[in-house]
Amino acid sequence: MRRLQEQGKARFIGITGYPLKTLVKIAEAAPADSILTYCRYNLMINDMDTVLMPVAKKHGIGVINASGLHMGILTERGAPDWHPAPREVRDAGKQAAAFCREQGVDLSQVALRYCFDHSRVASTLVGMSTRSHVTQNLETLRSTVDPDLMRKVNAILAPVFNYVWPSGRPENHDSSIF
């Protein structure tokens, strides 16, 4: 890969995945220019900061945060049927969405603003399937979140905070709270 980069056929070399333990192992063995991880830094989890960021900083690797909406859990619509999180995690998302709705706020905007505010993340990827999603996300870039509302949303999500579902081979699983 580095040879391709030296030849100008690739600008950056990156790795991506869900299990942080695996990403750290790869980054330590053959540092990349960027690491994209998903569902590891948002209102429901922050282990990207404690597990991945120290390695990224040590090696000068840029970090891309994806799925700030926790693959749909942190939206008004909620998670799709195929989502790997257990019922407790999905239910916490529904409770947070209901609370935000009662406050006249959209949970997805709160969740994305939280991700956008991370000082060390090079970029936060956001999926958008409609023109209204684009408009809403642009509004989120200009918005702020009331700290009291954020504390209350965090309290709703606290019982399932930092849950990591199994992914891939068992020996590569990260720990979880359940």
Image (cartoon, rainbow, N blue to C red):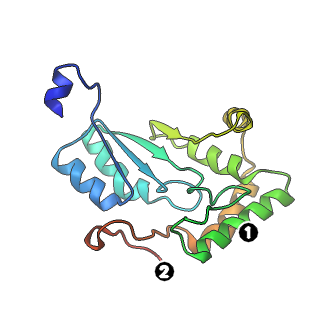
Q: In this rendering, would 89 be left or right of 100?
A: left
Asked if residue 96 is positioned above or below residue 114 in the image, the reply reads: below
Q: Image quadrant of residue 97?
A: bottom right
Residue 61 against residue 172 in the figure, above or below: above
Three-letter residue code for mark 1:
Gln
The one nearer the camera, 44 or 152, is: 44
78 to the left or right of 106: left
Q: Residue lying at the far bottom in this picture: please name it.
A: 178
In which quadrant of the rendered view does residue 169 lie?
bottom left
Pinpoint residue 141: horizontal percent, then vertical percent.
66, 34
Q: Amino acid at mark 2?
A: Phe
How many other residues sit within 10 Å of disc 2, few (<14), some (14-19) or many (≥20)?
few
Q: Secondary structure at mark 1?
A: helix
Q: Residue 132: horizontal and vertical position, in percent?
A: 74, 36
Classify mark 2: helix, strand or loop: loop
Q: Are circles 2 and 1 on residues that touch, CB within 8 Å?
A: no
Work out how far the residue at label 2 is from the one at label 1, CA to CA, in angstroms: 19 Å
State the residue position of label 2. 178
In which quadrant will I find the N terminus?
Answer: top left
Residue 154's label in the rendered image is none
Question: Residue shown at 38%/72% (left/top)?
Answer: 175
> Where is mark 1, residue-wise?
95
Q: Counting residues from the N terminus, which is met first, the one under dot 2 or under dot 1?
A: 1
